[in-house]
Image (cartoon, rainbow, N blue to C red):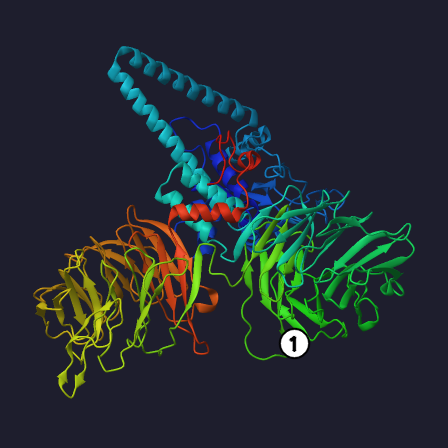
């Protein structure tokens, strides 16, 4: 008997919302009230357990399914997984059990060929030729169109009825009747329940109280269900509409602030860290143009409005209004001078107000450029037979119209751009650079693009150009070079690209397609050595044609997508993160990683370097307050211990001690700066591997690399007790329980974790062995967290070692987990994974900056779980380390999401994404 009644095959990038909606609706259509579902539908995200064998799981689902439902879209047509699923089905089953749903794109049947037409861009290749006659398909192409009510639309129920009838092999009319009957039956039951509650309300005051409580519970559950729906919808939009994903996550958290909605908020806040801000406009963006220095962007809309946007500010400023669609804009470096054309007129906004540039009679403008100083303007125009360039020199007060030099043997100038105040770039079938205002030619290059080639934006210095044709190898040419011999190239994965642009010196290229914005290095064609993998920026829908530009000489980009303008910084650590440099040089490959400890208020940090020779105290990035100091002893004191913060804001620094002419150094450390306290413990041959203070600051426990355990009075350094276990060998790492009664020693030779009584040194239990050795361990309030060599993480009873839980994920990297009262942070090679300890749920992951993942690092979380701080040593070739402070506090994440999303959800957004009646107040706050 088949485990699944149907298998849904779809492209996640285009059809996740439709697939989820269909799965839910088909399973519950005409469902008896007492059953969970009428049929079982396989969909990858909802039906697969954590399993590294992805295809095997999918193949098992296909094998167990009776029907295959394919959601047709251009993304599905390009999807390797969708093609493989269909190909498997046709090889092992038949096309008669394939149900088609038209989601996006063009779909038609060629009756002469008895196959899908060539114009059908949403049909995966294996489906072509698979049907003996024209198949029937359901139409959902309207589902996520503007104004659509989604699952509330009556057409959706009709399509669900078609699919459910086929899958259940029941006549459609009979199934519709059954659905209506079940609905009526449920409604009758509901009315009976309401009547019963009404009788109870009349019967007694007690019953009234019970009913009120029940009502509150129903409302609570309704809120909970709505919050879950909002969180799930937010997750589904992360890769293609991050702005609305953030807003939905905020609504989910505001509706029901649980660990689940907090996790959705965190995921949305941490997704695509390169995205800095989104600006929604009232109409589709038709053109964008940055100032030469990248500080401002000119924005033109389909409705004729023209804006200037200071990239450092939050909101754009309306500057002009033309009669038609804005076809070109230009903007000065100070953002004051803005020019725009709409095919009929040329308007210029300056400090003194708007003005019109008069063109020769009959000439219609199609291109415009503004000099960085704002004193030069060039307009390209034509009258259907002659092309002209109008040169406006505001400094000299002159205006001159000349013949378009690119129209002599070509179609004329299509784009204009000032390279500086004295050079103008003209682009058409030819690329020329000319002086302004004399307009003498400086350079010239001939470029003829093929029918399938899409020209990219020329580099900011005007020296290189490019074009894409769908191939991953993208050529880059000097503008005055031979088009048949590109001198540079970039490897960029792309499908149906919409825009491409070179940065200021053509060392980078950005290509936008349905999958996001791909950022890749541009290298000489014969260059040796490896090339970094392209960086893909996700979180927006399809970029508008030529709606992608770099800003000045930076790596930042601006993209126009529909009516939204987005700012991207590929080097950003994230919207929730602040960064600063720190003097933390590379130590050595055999040294320990740096250690960071946060103060109790989370605004200051103490960082010990990998050589255990220096401890620095600094402010956490993005926060004020706290002391600033550095302890780097000039006389031998032995290795420095991990620093500890005391309640009064003092940093307690211990050292192992050293052999001197006068004996072993023990007692107060020499040369401690203000804000430090500490002493040497007098054990120069043993590194201090762990230090922890009691909750009341009165007592301190210390563990050294030879297994010695000491207890000290915190303020005086007086030794209160000690224990020296025998026969353990060298200790690599150690952890101390919060109450200082237990220590866990990770043995170097056997890779075992030995847990001892801190007072007596007697052994309590052991974990791990040479085959499945222990890598790191950390104590929580009631748990011992252990990471093993294989990357698995286990929660153990700290008293007995009994395994309570083993996490399904694997965590590869170094560094002990960090535990607070409410949160667990597990460092890996690529970031930090966070868990909520109140219910054990996974909150999400904080990725390390891509260029820092190879650098040695240390992490800590503030005691209230509101901030994660990561410190990175400097790489070999850099002078400074890096500190990244990531906000985890939900209220601050909400404020960040609202600020960077540019506007709140609208009623139309709610009905399209969620359905039903929206809340009275959708304001993001």
Report the residue at 43% width, 35% height from top.
226
Quickly name the residue at label 1.
525
Q: Image height check: is 253 above or below 530? A: above
In the image shown, does 395 or 293 lie closer to the viewer? 395
Q: In which quadrant will I find the N terminus?
A: top left
Q: Secondary structure at mark 1?
A: loop
Question: On the image, which quarter does residue 700 sit in?
Answer: bottom left
Report the residue at 39% width, 19% height from top.
189
Q: Where in the figure is residue 157, as x and y percent of width and height?
A: 55, 30
Q: Where in the figure is residue 8, as x and y percent of width and height?
A: 52, 44
Look at the image and tell me whether residue 43 can be seen: no
Q: Residue furthest bottom?
A: 661
Look at the image and tell me whether residue 653 can be seen: yes
Q: Image height check: is 69 above or below 804? A: above
In the image shown, does 861 or 578 lie closer to the viewer? 578
Question: On the image, which quarter does residue 472 sit in?
Answer: bottom right
- Residue neighbourhood size for the residue with mark 1, other residues' Cα within 10 Å, grouped as few (<14), some (14–19), many (≥20): some
- On screen, residue 567 versus residue 216, left or right, reads right
In the image shown, does 609 or 771 lie closer to the viewer? 609
Q: Where in the figure is residue 284, as x and y percent of width and height?
A: 67, 45
Image mark count? 1
Q: Where in the figure is residue 691, as x and y percent of width and height?
A: 20, 66
């Amino acid at each position: 008997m088949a485990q699944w009644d149907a298998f849904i095959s779809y492209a996640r990038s285009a059809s996740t919302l439709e697939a989820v909606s269909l799965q839910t609706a088909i399973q519950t259509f005409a469902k008896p009230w007492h059953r969970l579902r009428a049929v079982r539908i396989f969909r990858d995200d909802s039906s697969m357990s954590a399993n590294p064998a992805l295809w095997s799981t999918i193949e098992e689902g296909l094998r167990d399914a009776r029907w295959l439902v394919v959601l047709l879209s251009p993304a599905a047509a390009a999807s390797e997984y969708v093609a493989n699923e269909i190909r498997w089905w046709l090889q092992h089953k038949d096309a008669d059990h394939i149900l088609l749903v038209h989601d996006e794109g063009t779909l038609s049947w060629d009756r002469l060929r008895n196959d899908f037409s060539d114009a059908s861009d949403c049909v995966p290749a294996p489906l072509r030729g698979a049907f003996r006659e024209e198949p029937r398909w359901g139409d959902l192409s309207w589902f996520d169109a503007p104004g659509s009510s989604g699952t509330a639309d009556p057409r959706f129920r009709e399509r669900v009825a078609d699919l459910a009838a086929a899958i259940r092999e029941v006549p459609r009319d009979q199934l519709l009747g059954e659905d209506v009957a079940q609905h009526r039956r449920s409604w009758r039951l509901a009315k009976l329940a309401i009547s019963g509650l009404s009788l109870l309300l009349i019967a007694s005051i007690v019953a009234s109280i019970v009913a009120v409580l029940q009502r509150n519970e129903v409302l609570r559950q309704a809120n909970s269900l709505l919050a879950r729906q909002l969180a799930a919808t937010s997750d589904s939009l992360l890769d293609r509409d991050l702005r609305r994903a953030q807003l939905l996550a905020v609504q989910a958290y505001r509706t029901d602030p649980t660990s689940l909605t907090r996790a959705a908020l965190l995921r949305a806040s941490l997704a695509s860290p390169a995205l800095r801000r989104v600006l929604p406009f009232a109409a589709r963006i038709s053109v964008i143009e940055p100032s030469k220095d990248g500080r401002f962007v000119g924005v033109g809309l389909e409705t004729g409005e023209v804006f200037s946007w200071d990239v450092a500010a939050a909101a754009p400023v309306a500057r002009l209004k033309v009669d038609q669609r804005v076809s070109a804009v230009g903007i000065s470096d100070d953002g004051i001078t803005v020019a725009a054309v709409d095919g009929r007129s040329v308007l210029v906004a300056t400090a003194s107000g708007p003005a019109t540039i008069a063109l020769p009679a009959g000439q219609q403008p199609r291109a415009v450029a503004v000099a960085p100083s704002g004193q030069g303007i060039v307009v390209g125009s034509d009258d259907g037979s002659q092309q002209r360039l109008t040169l406006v020199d505001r400094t000299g007060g002159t205006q001159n119209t000349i013949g378009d030099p690119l129209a002599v043997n070509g179609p004329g100038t299509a784009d204009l751009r000032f390279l500086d105040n004295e050079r103008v770039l003209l682009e058409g079938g030819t690329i020329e650079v000319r002086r302004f205002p004399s307009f003498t030619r400086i350079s010239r290059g001939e470029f003829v693009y093929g029918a399938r080639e899409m020209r990219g934006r020329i580099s900011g210095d005007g020296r290189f150009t490019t074009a894409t044709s769908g191939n991953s190898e993208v050529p880059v040419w000097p503008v005055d070079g031979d088009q048949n011999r590109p001198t540079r190239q970039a490897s960029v994965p792309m499908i149906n690209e919409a825009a491409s642009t070179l940065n200021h010196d053509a060392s980078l290229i950005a290509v936008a397609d349905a999958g996001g914005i791909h950022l890749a290095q541009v290298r000489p064609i014969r260059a040796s050595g490896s090339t970094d993998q392209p960086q893909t920026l996700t979180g927006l829908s399809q970029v508008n044609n030529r709606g992608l530009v770099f800003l000045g000489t930076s790596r930042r980009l601006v993209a126009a997508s529909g009516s939204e303008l987005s700012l991207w910084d590929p080097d950003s650590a994230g919207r929730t993160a602040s960064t600063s440099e720190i003097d933390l040089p590379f130590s050595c490959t055999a040294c320990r990683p740096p250690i960071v400890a946060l103060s109790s208020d989370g605004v200051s940090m103490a960082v010990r370097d990998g050589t255990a020779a220096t401890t620095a105290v600094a402010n956490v990035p993005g926060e004020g307050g706290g002391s600033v100091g550095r302890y780097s002893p000039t006389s031998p004191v032995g290795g420095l211990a991990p620093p500890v913060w005391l309640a009064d804001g003092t940093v307690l620094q211990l050292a192992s001690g050293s052999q001197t002419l006068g004996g072993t150094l023990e007692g107060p450390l020499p040369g401690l700066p203000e804000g430090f306290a500490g002493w040497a413990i007098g054990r120069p041959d043993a590194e201090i591997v762990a230090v922890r203070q009691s909750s009341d600051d009165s007592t301190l426990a210390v563990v050294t690399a030879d297994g010695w355990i000491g207890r000290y009075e915190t303020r005086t350094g007086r030794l209160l007790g000690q224990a020296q276990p025998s026969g353990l060998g060298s200790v690599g790492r150690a952890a101390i329980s919060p109450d200082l009664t237990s220590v866990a020693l990770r043995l170097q030779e056997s890779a075992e974790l030995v847990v001892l009584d801190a007072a007596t040194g007697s052994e309590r239990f052991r974990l791990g062995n040479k085959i499945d050795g222990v890598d790191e361990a950390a104590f929580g309030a009631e748990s011992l967290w252990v990471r093993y060599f294989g990357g698995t993480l286990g929660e153990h009873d700290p008293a007995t070692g009994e395994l309570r839980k083993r996490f399904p994920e694997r965590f590869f990297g170094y560094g002990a987990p960090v535990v607070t009262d409410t949160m667990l942070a597990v460092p890996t090679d690529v970031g930090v994974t966070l868990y909520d300890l109140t219910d054990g749920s996974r909150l999400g992951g904080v990725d390390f900056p891509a260029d820092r993942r190879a650098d040695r690092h240390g992490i800590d979380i503030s005691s209230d779980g509101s901030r994660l701080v990561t410190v990175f040593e400097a790489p070999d070739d850099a002078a400074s380390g890096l500190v990244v402070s990531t906000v985890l506090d939900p209220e601050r994440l909400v404020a960040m999401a609202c600020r960077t999303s540019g506007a709140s959800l609208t009623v139309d957004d709610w009905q399209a994404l969620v359905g039903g009646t929206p809340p009275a107040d959708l304001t993001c706050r």
